[in-house]
Amino acid sequence: MGMWGERMIEIIGFDADDTLWHNEILYSQAKDQFQVLLAPYGDPERVRQRLDEIEEWNVRHYGYGIKSFALSMVEAAIEISHGQIEAPRLSRILDIVKEMLNAEVKPLEPVEPTLAVLAQQFPLMLITKGDFFEQHRKIERSGLAKYFRYIEIVVDKTPDTYRGVLAKYHLEPHRFLMVGNSLRSDILPVLEIGGQAVYIPYASTWAHEKVDETTRTAIKYIEIEHLGQLPELIENL
Amino acid sequence: MGMWGERMIEIIGFDADDTLWHNEILYSQAKDQFQVLLAPYGDPERVRQRLDEIEEWNVRHYGYGIKSFALSMVEAAIEISHGQIEAPRLSRILDIVKEMLNAEVKPLEPVEPTLAVLAQQFPLMLITKGDFFEQHRKIERSGLAKYFRYIEIVVDKTPDTYRGVLAKYHLEPHRFLMVGNSLRSDILPVLEIGGQAVYIPYASTWAHEKVDETTRTAIKYIEIEHLGQLPELIENL
């Protein structure tokens, strides 16, 4: 067991998408392709903005994940083209979706050796939000499942979500350390329930995940550049 | 605690879709609407058959659920119309999908009073397969969540799935009774791991769920007509 401040950490939780492996880039590449496909119908910047808006609106109907994103692309294509979109372009959208679903799940650079070290010192828990089927498949494909004693796929990451998960494992919040790339989903809600959090920003952060600067300066968390710095951070505290 | 044969039942598990509430009918109504939409492009029977085939094939890419079905409808519409499908018809497909996602979740007739009785005698567990976000929302909307001590949303219902769930609750298989409308998902895998099962056929059964007659006659389970008969069945055994 490691020490964290003067308090013992019992379990380390990890976000998955863009903390353990690349994910956002799949969406941003798909959006690039979508812009090209829709170029005959609209200014690329406007196309992207409208897709983002439709995607964000549709989360309430569809939830998160690639299939939801797919339906938003179809809807956006019809709207942006004023119903003129040709079927081959729509087929191409469906192909993009299948390519996303079948994409390789590449762990970020220092992830695997770091998890191998930490898994010998702590029980590790993977906590990921999103489509169950898709997340499940990514975990399997990543080759990282073996480092996690517990895996939780949740609908959303609110303080109540974390409360529920910790209660399930009879864990006091201050003995829980969460590591992730999203202030909104991995850091803020964990701090709110009295847990500890390490923030590892990902190069580009998904629009939905942004937190305004006021909130950001009002909270306390530790920030590192990559996961490889985590073992030393834990040892030195 | 109730008796079942000479063995004590500790937990009763219930399937959800078409066991507790109508579900299949949403898909079959959507397919009716799809046939009408595609009528200019193909014989209705052929349209339905091709949609069923594409849907079944796509389960491996998309998993189960309404969003997966939606993407299959879009793909089928493009294919069946040889790329001639007009955008307003595609928009109508997206509307059908949102109507399905927002449809009322109606418990089947004798379900609620029966669960109310059984929940006083046994811990009840809901075990449902499908899209996590969609199933989660249906459970909330059904008003039935309060009768279940445990809720498990699983990717698929194989013998290993049930083994995993029972292990999690430290439950011996022969002390577990599963109730559901699908021989393939609710009855066979539970019998295979040594559990007990009550089959309540739903009027129309989803094509993917069919089990051939040979398998069907080789296995032993109890069949009742509706959930209202379950408490008496349990008492009399």
Image (spheres, coloured by chain):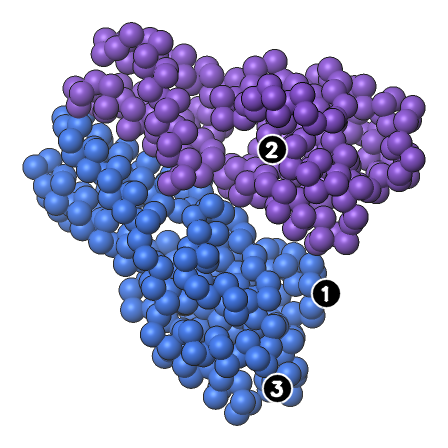
Chain colours: A blue, B purple
Which mark identifies residue A170?
1
Label 3 neighbour load within 10 Å: few <14, some 14-19, many 20+? some
In depth, the one of A114 and B135 nearer the eye is A114
Which mark identifies residue B185?
2
Which mark identifies residue A3?
3
Residue A124 % position (x, y): 57, 70
Residue at disc 2, secondary structure? helix
Measure how far apart labels 1 and 3 are at the Cα level. Answer: 19 Å
Q: State the image quarter where residue B73 is shown.
A: top left
Q: Would you say residue B110 is visible in this rendering?
A: no
Q: Do the residues labelled 2 and 3 touch (CB within 8 Å)?
A: no
Whether residue B74 sits left or right of residue A32 in the image: it is: right
Label 1 neighbour load within 10 Å: few <14, some 14-19, many 20+? few
Residue at disc 1, secondary structure? loop
The amino acid type found where label 3 is placed reads Met
The amino acid type found where label 1 is placed reads His
Which mark identifies residue B165?
none
**Label located before the other in sequence (1 or 3):** 3
For the point 7% across and 37% down, which residue is it? A40
Subunit of label 2:
B
